[in-house]
């Protein structure tokens, strides 16, 4: 009998899981091992998984309750929680000329930001389209302690950029929907305050909660200082290869990442056709990190 194997693929983050056929029903033991690897390594990968939509849906259930994301069409009916992400004909050129997709965590502008995201490569070109990931535990841990303490007291505004106003080539409004709590609402468009340092609800570890795409203002700070601090933190996260991992897709690959402690960005240098299926898992309200002095007082 083939046994489940979990092997790290990067020094900072990421593990590949093999020895399992996800088209078969998952045993509770294997489901638990996969969930543990997801928490331990922040992002996990599988290869050679030729899954039907119901099989992919069953994998998603290991990570919580799914919802259909507003930004792309979905399979509909019982499978509405699977979105279809396909590259259009000018993806490569647009990606080079227009960096409107940058490092981000999914749904960070929601009241309950996305927990896990799952992507399954259904049709992958031979070159290009890698995904870059950042370990946001490491991003926090490697800040100077004085900066850690300052960040723990701050809140940051996460806003959904209205692409349809600022970028006519952006998201198509026909995909916007009114799924309660997960569609684009006034709070998402006006900006939502979340802690700049969050505590992961399952691991208890602290992570930096900043990204270039959606986090655009630090609250209650002079505008110039807020902008400079934001630039410093974003540069720290996205320009430090030591806590990044680059994933190369193949047809049948699956990536599952934890938005509560990672950032990711697609690299839009691929040719078409490319098609992926995506499942998006509900998250919870972000918990504020507590400064070390306060922790010791509380203890
Ligand atoms: Fe994303």
Image: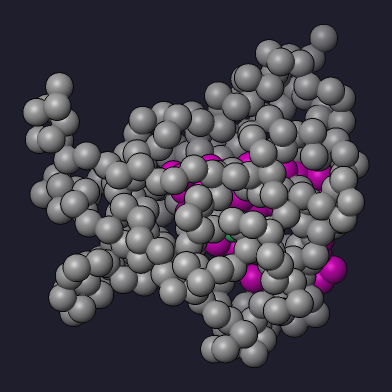
Q: Is residue 98 visible?
A: yes
Q: Residue 193 appears at what percent x and percent y?
A: 35, 61
Q: Is residue 92 visible?
A: no
Locate residue 62 relative to residue 234 in the image: left or right.
right
At a point 27% along the width and 42% down the height, the residue shown is 289
Locate residue 103 relative to residue 297 in the image: left or right.
right
Q: Residue 160 appears at what percent x and percent y?
A: 51, 71
Ligand 1: quadrant of the figure: bottom right
Q: Residue 163 appears at what percent x and percent y?
A: 58, 81
Work out whether 25 lies above or below 272: above
Q: The C terminus appears in which quarter of the rendering?
A: top left
Q: Nearer the viewer, residue 212 or 279?
A: 279
Work out whether 259 lies above or below 217: above
Image mark count: 0
Locate residue 71 relative to residue 51 in the image: left or right.
left
Q: Nearer the viewer, residue 109 or 83?
A: 109
Q: Nearer the viewer, residue 280 or 185?
A: 185
At a point 19% along the width and 52% down the height, the residue shown is 153
Q: The N terminus appears in which quarter of the rendering?
A: top right
Q: Which residues are magenta?
A: 247-275
At a point 59% along the width and 68% down the height, the residue shown is 184
**Is residue 266 on the magenta stretch?**
yes
At a point 14% along the width and 27% down the height, the residue shown is 298
Work out whether 215 lies above or below 260: below
**Colour scheme shown:** one colour
Q: Residue 2 appears at what percent x and percent y?
A: 79, 14
Residue 43 found in image quarter: top right
């Amino acid at each position: 009998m083939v046994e489940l194997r979990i092997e790290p693929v990067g020094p900072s983050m990421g593990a590949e899981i093999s020895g399992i056929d996800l088209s078969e029903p998952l045993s509770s033991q294997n489901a638990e091992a996969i969930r543990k690897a997801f928490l331990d390594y922040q992002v996990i990968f599988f290869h050679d998984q030729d899954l039907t939509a119901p099989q992919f849906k069953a994998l998603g259930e290991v990570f919580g309750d799914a919802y259909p994301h507003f930004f792309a069409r979905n399979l509909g009916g019982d499978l509405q929680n699977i979105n279809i992400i396909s590259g259009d004909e000018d993806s490569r050129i647009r990606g080079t000329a227009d960096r409107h997709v940058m490092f981000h965590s999914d749904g960070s502008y929601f009241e309950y930001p996305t927990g896990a995201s799952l992507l399954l490569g259904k049709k992958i070109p031979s070159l290009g389209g890698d995904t870059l990931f950042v370990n946001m535990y490491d991003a926090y841990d490697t800040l100077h302690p004085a900066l850690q303490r300052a960040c723990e007291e701050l809140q940051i505004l996460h806003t959904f950029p209205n692409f349809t106003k600022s970028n006519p080539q952006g998201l198509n409004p026909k995909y916007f929907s009114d799924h309660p709590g997960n569609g684009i609402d006034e709070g998402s468009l006006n900006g939502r305050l979340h802690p700049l340092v969050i505590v992961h609800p399952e691991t208890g570890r602290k992570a930096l909660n900043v990204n270039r795409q959606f986090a655009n203002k630090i609250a209650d700070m002079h505008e110039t200082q807020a902008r400079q601090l934001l630039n410093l933190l974003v540069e720290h996260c996205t320009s430090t290869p030591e806590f990044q991992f680059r994933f190369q897709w193949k047809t049948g690959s699956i990536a599952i990442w934890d938005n509560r402690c990672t950032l990711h960005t697609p690299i839009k240098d691929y040719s078409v056709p490319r098609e992926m299926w995506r499942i998006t898992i509900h998250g919870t309200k972000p918990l504020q990190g507590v400064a070390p002095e306060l922790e010791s007082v509380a203890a």
